[in-house]
Image: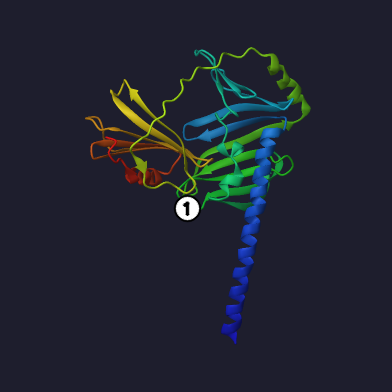
Amino acid sequence: MKPFWYAVSLLAGSLFYSSVAPAQQTASGALLQQMEQASQSLNYEIAYINVSRLGIESLRYRHAVVDNKVYAQLLQMDGPRREIIQRGNEISYFESGLTPFTLNGGYIVDSLPAVVNADFTKLASHYDFIAVGRTRIADQLCEVIRIVPRDGTRYSYMVWLDSETKLPLRADLLDRDGETLEQYRVVSFAVDEGVRNLMQGLSNANLPPALAVPAGEKVTLGWKAGWLPDGMQQVSESRRAIPALNKPVESRLYSDGLFSFSVSVSPADGNSVAQLLRTGRRTVQTVVRNNVEITVIGELPPSTAKRIADSIDTGTSR
């Protein structure tokens, strides 16, 4: 009888796990969606640091919504003054020694982790959201959730979000061995109307003119990627002449909404060599095949970048 009851217990356990795992995924995904909504709708100020292999950055970020328009400011706290201001869909850049300029965009992407503005309803198809527990960050009780790609071809995130406001107070970018590549960590923060009143003054600020970006030429590239990580979609493609290289370069940009990378294809020359460079989250993988130089640049583990580069079918474009 013992084997019978052992088999029954195994079956019951598997049924219990199959019902609990999706529920946990749904609950964690809902928390992450609340984090996204809080980051985009609350009036708040945070002081935080970014830690990476390149060093430590100290920054301050303010965000407010005034008359349904987003106002934000990102300020580098140490060294030469570098400031980015958002007013609606205008993102203006100010940096010592450079002419200020404005670009169109939905939010400030510089020095903020991608998870802050990610669409978790779309990511749920290719990532698991795993509840890890609770702990304290910046003297606040936080929910801890890990964001893991199901196919194992990308990095993962560990996110700490404030249990009360749902704002992200820490985000660690982890490689596939669990080592931290980059860390975003809030030191102090405030959520109040004072931030809204302060940011409202930007409504009358004189911002630099929008940078003229020439319309991209519609092109049809004769090569394709034979393999991509699950969920990666093409965002754009282009063909341009690079005077410094004295040769044409064809490129495609891909993203899954959390990580992105580009693939460039050009004729090989005497300087073309296979190489691998990695700095923190960014990998540069170059392969040379059939007189074609293929380069993958982006937020990918080296083995994934190499697999993408090896899968490129250059067809007859060269």
Q: Residue 114: image x %, image y %?
A: 56, 37
Q: Nearer the viewer, residue 43 or 61?
A: 43
Residue 84 left/right relative to 315: right
Residue placed under numbered mark 1 in the picture = 151
Q: Is residue 279 visible?
A: no
The quarter of the rendered structure image containing the N terminus is bottom right
- Residue at 45% of width from left, 47% of height from top? 229
Q: Nearer the viewer, residue 155 or 253?
A: 253
Vertical order, 132 against 239 (above or below): below
- Residue at 77% of width from left, 30% of height from top? 192
Q: Secondary structure at mark 1?
A: loop
- Type of amino acid under label 1: Asp
Vertical order, 152 against 293 (above or below): below
Q: Is residue 306 visible?
A: yes
Q: Residue 71: image x %, image y %?
A: 67, 24
Q: Residues within 10 Å of mark 1 (few under 14, many from 20)?
A: few
Q: Residue 176: image x %, image y %?
A: 47, 49
